[in-house]
Amino acid sequence: MNYSNHPATKEYRRLLRRTQTPTERILWKKLRGKQMDGYRFRQQHGFGPYVLDFYCPSLRLCIELDGDVHNNEEVRLKDDERTLFLTQNKIHVLRFRNEEVEQDIDNVMNRIRVFIITSINRLSVVQTPTPLTQGAHEGVQTPNPLT
């Protein structure tokens, strides 16, 4: 099932992009145009019933910025539901407080970069096939015990 960018939310997503918060503007300046290690991020990307602040499809990475409203218990519970839904759909979620972005954008960018590097390393381990050697019988392949 395709949950991305439902047409019903298109105008709302456009409105969010036009009226972005100052904090979103700071982070978007650093993410747009493949500035983050060549990865393309989208701003205000729809996924299921949610609109993600920033999303990188190739990494399946969602970045959410949390202002003071996220200190509210009810909002935190909704954030948890959202994170669970995204995680169940194999989307990783990184959350940053607005203050982190405003006061130490370099640290935020470094944490995103660490996530990317970790993800790439995890994928390369999972996707790397085991080298094979010729077995004792012609045509039989066995895993190489030296690797």
Image (spheres, grey):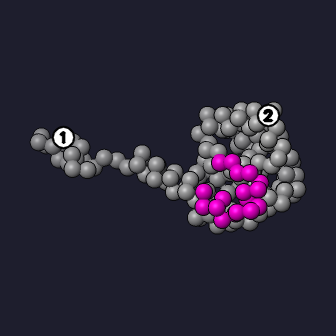
**Residue placed at 62% from the left, 49% from the top?**
61
Residue 45, x across and y down, in percent: 74, 49
Relative to residue 72, is residue 61 depicted above or below?
Answer: below
* Disc on res. 120: none
Is residue 130 found left or right of 67 in the rendered image? left
- Which residue shows up at 66% across the image and 59% down it? 108
Q: Does the magenta-highlighted stretch encompass residue 106?
A: yes
In the rendered view, would you say 35 is above or below 133? below
The residue pinned by badge 2 equals 73
Q: Is residue 95 magenta?
A: yes
The rendered magenta stretch, by its main secondary structure, is classed as helix
Q: Amino acid at mark 2?
A: Glu
Q: Which residues are magenta?
A: 94-111
Residue 6, visible in the rendered structure: no
Real-space CA distance between mark 1 and mark 2, rounded to the nearest whole angstrom: 60 Å
Outermost residue, left direction?
136
Q: Which mark is residue 140?
A: 1
Q: Is residue 137 left or right of residue 80?
A: left
In percent of width and height, residue 28 lies at: 74, 61
Q: Amino acid at mark 1?
A: Val
Quadrant where the image shows the N terminus: top right
SS assignment at label 1: loop
- Residue 22 in the image, given as x and y percentages of width and height: 83, 60
Quick one: 68 or 122, which is closer to the camera? 68
Callout 1 crowding tier (Cα within 10 Å): few <14, some 14–19, many ≥20: few
**Whether residue 105 is visible:** yes
- Give the answer, above or below, for where 139 lies relative to 29: above
Residue closer to the observer: 102 or 121: 102
Pick whichever of labels 1 and 2 is earlier in the sequence.
2
